[in-house]
Every structure is written in structure tokens, then in C-alpha cells.
């Protein structure tokens, strides 16, 4: 394997990458540089956009100037996705159109590689079919969350999807099972969320008055002596929003390792509940006529019976 050293380079954003996230642009441009390294140089401020530090999620504009620091790339960089993941991703495709795909993403598979994960949905799709070589995420759901995931197959269509998100023309509904008897009158939670770093250095969200406005609407569907089945509608799309909001009220999601109750999770595992009970039930992009709707997972129904 041969390493190639690259001096500082500057890239002017063209119309091809207008509206694309900074991280996705660099992943496409810096072939041979691991995703973990790309996220590292962005978060350390070594990547500059128009001479300023930027977040991985920053949406680029035509004419933006990106400064890329010195780096080494490998001449052999192809990541091979396991047969199991490719089969699971392939079987999860529920709609295939010229410009986009809709998946019912399986639990346990990340949206993309990075942060110690070699590959995810995007890498698998690019290996499955040549038509998916330019596949890009329109949005994200957590690795341990299953459900609706929209994938753009063209950069031009990705920009349309992101425009819908910016204009708040996207509806997201989730199924979830929490510990305890959720009060029927608790129909919304409005608490500001701030991104932070946990003890292990991983990103997490905390409720903080200096955070961003965050709002989630809830509907109680069913309850028993131990659990409650809810529908949640995302009003503001913050990281881990539903998970933090329900835990803040004393009703953590079953199987949520990061924000949940470990003693309750341990008892749930003894009953065979080995996943987080959060599912992206539906998503719709109103002005584009795109709607994905899935069934509530059987496991969620079984736990309530």
C-alpha cells in the first residue's frame, strides 16, 4: 500500500456541490482519506470554509472556498462491505425511483461508515449496483434505529431534498416503546438541546438553556403495567431529540444504552429485548410528493400484548 502526501489545497465549490454537506463533499473529493480522518480535520478546525471553522453538517454554496490541510491518502482505499450487510440493505429497499431510493433501514446498520464503523448503508448501496454509485443520504437515523431512510441518487435531487428540509416541509413520525405509564396528557415536550461530549468523548445531546429550540409531539397509542407505545412527531430535527426528551420526563426508551436506564435495560434483555425500541415509521417531503410509510415492528406490538 502506497501513501500519497498532499500539500494544502484550496477548492472552490461548483454548482455540482451546491447544497451538499461539507463532510459529504470532502468524502467525495478526498478519495483515499478515511472518513474518521475527514471528520477529525473538520472538527479540529483544520478545514476552513471562507477562512472560518465549519461543522460537518454545513451546507455549501457555490463559490465557497474550502481550505484542505496537508494530508496523506492511501492509493488502496476501497472498503468492502460484508455480504450480510449488503443483503440486509438490498432487502430493505422498498421503493426505487430514477432520482432516489427509500429504505426500511434494518436496526444495527449505520447510515454510513466512520467513527470506527467501516461501512454502512451508503457503502453497501454503492457496491450493490452501479446505478447507486452516487448515492447520498438525504437525512440520517441512528444506527440502532430502524425505519424510513431516503437516499438521493443524484446530487441535483439531493439539493431539492435538502431545500425541503431547510424550508421545514418534511414530516417525520416515529414509533417508540418507553418504560413506564406515559401520561396521556403529555402531548408535547419543548426543551432546548445542546450538543456536548460525554465521558468517553462521544457526541451526545443534553438539555441546556443555551441549546437550540427543540420540540417533539407525542401520542399515546397503548400502555400496560410496564411499557407505553407512543407515536412521536419531530417538529425540530435535533440530534437524539426524541431519546433525550422522553428520558428527561422519566420515561426512557427501552434498550437505549446512551440515554436510558441500564438496570431497566438489563431486565429487558433478560426477556429477549436486545435492541432499542425506536423506529422511523414514516417520512414525507411534501412538495416533492415523496412519502415513506412502514408498519410498526412486530416486536413493538408483542411487548405490549
Image: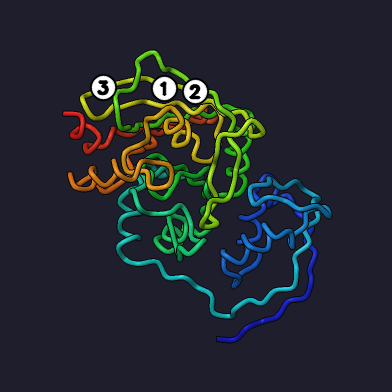
The residues bearing labels 1 and 2 have C-alpha atoms spaced at a distance of 8 Å
Q: Position of residue 243 (x, y in %)?
A: 44, 36
| Residue 257 relative to residue 223: left or right | right
Q: Which secondary structure lies at badge 3?
A: strand
Q: Position of residue 132 (x, y in %)?
A: 47, 56
Q: Quadrant of the C terminus?
A: top left
Residue sticking out furthest to the front: 263
User: Which residue: 31% across, 39% down?
Assistant: 254
User: Which residue: 55% across, 86% down?
Assistant: 1
Callout 3 environment at 10 Å: few (<14), some (14 to 19), or many (20+)? some
Q: Position of residue 139 (x, y in %)?
A: 52, 43
User: Which residue: 37% across, 43% down?
Assistant: 256
Q: Which residue is mark 2?
A: 189
Near-viewer residue (169 or 188): 188
Are the residues tagged 1 and 3 within 8 Å (C-beta)?
no
The residues bearing labels 3 and 2 have C-alpha atoms spaced at a distance of 19 Å
Are the residues tagged 1 and 2 within 8 Å (C-beta)?
yes
Mark 1 vs 2, N-terminal side: 2
Residue sticking out furthest to the right: 51
Q: Which secondary structure lies at badge 1?
A: strand
Near-viewer residue (117 or 256): 256
Mark carried by residue 218 = 1
Would you identify the image quadrant in which residue 281 lies?
top left
Q: Which residue is mark 3?
A: 222
Would you identify the image quadrant in which residue 34 lies?
bottom right
Q: Which marked residue is nearer to the observer: mark 3 or mark 2? A: 2
| Residue 43 relative to residue 153: left or right | right
The residues bearing labels 1 and 3 have C-alpha atoms spaced at a distance of 12 Å
Near-viewer residue (226 or 32): 226
| Residue 142 relative to residue 184: left or right | right
Q: Which marked residue is nearer to the observer: mark 1 or mark 2? A: 2
Q: Position of residue 221 (x, y in %)?
A: 29, 21
Amino acid at each position: 500500500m502506497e501513501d500519497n502526501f498532499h500539500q494544502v489545497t484550496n477548492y472552490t465549490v461548483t454548482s455540482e456541490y451546491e447544497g451538499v454537506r461539507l463532510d459529504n463533499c470532502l468524502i467525495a473529493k478526498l478519495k483515499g482519506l478515511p472518513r474518521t480522518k475527514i471528520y477529525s480535520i473538520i472538527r479540529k478546525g483544520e478545514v476552513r470554509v471562507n477562512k472560518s471553522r465549519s461543522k460537518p453538517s454545513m451546507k455549501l454554496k457555490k463559490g465557497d472556498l474550502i481550505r484542505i490541510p496537508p494530508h496523506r491518502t492511501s492509493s488502496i482505499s476501497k472498503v468492502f462491505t460484508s455480504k450480510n450487510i449488503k443483503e440486509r440493505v438490498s432487502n430493505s429497499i422498498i421503493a426505487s425511483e430514477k432520482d432516489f431510493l427509500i429504505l426500511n433501514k434494518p436496526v444495527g446498520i449505520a447510515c454510513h461508515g466512520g467513527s470506527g464503523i467501516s461501512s454502512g448503508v451508503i457503502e453497501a448501496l454503492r457496491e450493490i449496483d452501479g446505478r447507486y454509485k452516487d448515492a447520498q443520504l438525504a437525512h440520517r437515523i441512528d444506527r440502532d434505529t430502524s425505519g424510513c431512510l431516503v437516499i438521493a441518487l443524484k446530487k441535483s435531487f439531493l439539493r431539492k431534498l435538502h431545500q425541503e428540509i431547510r424550508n421545514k416541509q418534511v414530516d417525520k413520525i416515529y414509533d417508540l416503546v418507553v418504560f413506564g405509564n406515559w401520561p396521556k396528557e403529555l402531548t408535547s415536550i419543548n426543551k432546548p438541546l445542546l450538543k456536548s461530549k460525554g465521558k468517553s468523548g462521544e457526541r451526545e445531546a443534553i438539555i441546556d438553556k443555551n441549546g437550540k429550540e427543540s420540540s417533539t409531539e407525542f401520542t399515546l397509542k397503548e400502555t400496560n403495567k410496564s411499557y407505553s407505545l407512543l407515536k412521536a412527531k419531530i417538529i425540530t430535527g435535533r440530534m437524539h431529540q426524541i431519546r433525550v426528551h422522553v428520558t428527561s420526563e422519566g420515561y426512557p426508551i427501552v434498550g437505549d444504552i446512551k440515554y436510558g436506564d441500564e438496570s431497566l435495560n438489563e431486565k429487558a434483555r433478560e426477556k429477549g429485548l436486545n435492541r432499542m425500541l425506536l423506529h422511523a415509521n414514516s417520512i414525507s417531503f411534501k412538495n416533492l410528493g415523496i412519502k415513506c410509510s412502514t408498519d410498526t415492528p412486530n416486536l413493538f406490538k408483542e411487548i405490549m400484548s
